[in-house]
Amino acid sequence: MNELIGSFWWLIVTIGVLVTFHEFGHYIVARWCGVKVLRFSVGFGRSLWSRTDKHGTEFRLAIIPLGGYVKMLDERDEHVTPAERSLAFNQQPVGKRIAIIAAGPMANLLLCLVFYWGMFVAGKPDYVPLLGEATGIAAQAGIHEGDTLMQVDGTKTPTLTQTVPPLMLAAIDRRDVNIVLQDASGKQRNSILRLSQLPADFDQTRIFQAIGIKAAKSTRPAIVDFLAPGGAAVGRLQVGDRITKIGAIEITDAAQLAPAVVKQARPDQALSVLFLRDGQTRQVMIQPKQVSPEPGLLDKTKTLLGMETKNSQPEWKIGVGSASTPPKKTILRYGPIESIGKAFQQTWETTRTTFAMLKRLISGEASAKNVSGTITVAQVANQEANTSFGSFLGFLAFFSLSLCIMNLLPIPVLDGGHLMYYLIELVTGHPVAERVQMAGQFIGLALLAGLMLLAHYNDFARLFSN
């Protein structure tokens, strides 16, 4: 699927599933509490389809699929007849109102647990935390190429992804952490990453680079996997040929192919290519061609905005493909029963890390660059969906938990803001004054608008800095 279309599609799927379930939480608990629900809308704007059930609830599918809402009978919004006054939301005891509002975030929490369980059962592809050549702080810690990172700050790290949260938090704090390494022979040793040596202005969005950690990359011979139709190598090379030299450059790794061609290519000057076929060394002369690269999501976005793209210049190619082997893969997978406990454990770990990051963002310790918006969500959704079903379930679980936590923040206009008002009412015995609620709504909207602007500014800054 085209990257731009794919990102937009999986964004719609993500928001559609998570927000619909969130609103269903509000809806079902409102029904249980005896509140009349006027409308359950998936999406915003003009209705594409609707149906009204026997309880008078309109179920609607709207034209803008980026969210949804539940509208309940409420005297503050419209006239309510005396016969239906007992069915209005604002007439319910404060305990019921708290339950109805809290049901949305709790629905996302439940969904998070279900998705994490599904991720562990289906299996999530990942990489073994096998490390490459270390530099800087990592080299000072005695990390060598071929070491495997087994633990960070007391947290076991069976996959490369799981090394990121503890390293990120410790790096932001600029706090030294204990790590456990395992060498190629299987022998383990303890070491300390002196993260207190990180400069105050290090790039928090590139933790590995700041520390000097690199994931190990396996190499493979430059064996021709495919020939581009109409490419310069057609009729000269075959699939299965092993390229050993291009021009004056020896080729020992597939990753060296493209740079060797670009470095030596000249107009009207063919390159000598040595290769092995059926155990025999052969030589051909190939004239590289200039080929315009296929535009990615960034280039298409810039084109839509009328901006010049960096990668629009043609590149010298001979028309063969041979990729380097990625880092050693593993699959995070457990049985259906064991996955239940793992889902709760993963949810707790993610919750703890999220609140730790929020605390650091509020205090200013964490950079505002860590805040991401819709563009990043769309890109990650597309990437995970194209990786595996288990990876996409893991992404949905993380995003569902993020929605739960965000909605519970005590910010007016969010569920957490309403809960804050109701808890005050529960303690004082009377509702918060309407003028105070209106002022809170204004402040809450301003905070959310500022947060959204920051998130999308970061998204575009990341796009255009690549």
Image (cartoon, rainbow, N blue to C red):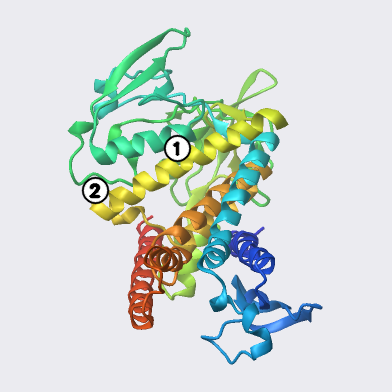
Q: In the rendered image, which residue does mark 1 sit on? A: 260
Q: Residues within 10 Å of mark 1 (few under 14, many from 20)?
A: some
Amino acid on which disc 1 is placed: Ala
Q: CA distance from mark 1 to mark 2?
A: 44 Å
**Residue 104, image x and y in percent?**
57, 61
The residue positioned 33% from the left and 19% from the top of the image is 143
Looking at the image, which residue sits at the far right? Answer: 54
Image quadrant where residue 373 sits: bottom left
In this view, 121 is above or below 292:
above
Q: Nearer the viewer, residue 309 or 228?
A: 309
Q: Nearer the viewer, residue 301 or 138?
A: 138
What numbered label is drawn on residue 245?
Answer: none
The residue positioned 65% from the left and 45% from the top of the image is 114
Q: In the rendered image, which residue does mark 2 sit on? A: 365
Q: Residues within 10 Å of mark 2 (few under 14, many from 20)?
A: some
In this view, 457 is above or below 405:
below
Q: Is residue 292 visible?
A: no
Number of the front mark, 1 or 2: 2
Task: Give the quadrant of the C terminus.
Answer: bottom left
Amino acid on which disc 2 is placed: Glu
Mark positioned earlier in the residue sequence (1 or 2): 1
| Left or right: 342 in relation to 32 | left
**Residue 132, image x and y in percent?**
40, 25
Looking at the image, which residue sits at the far front? Answer: 429
**Residue 96, image x and y in percent?**
57, 65
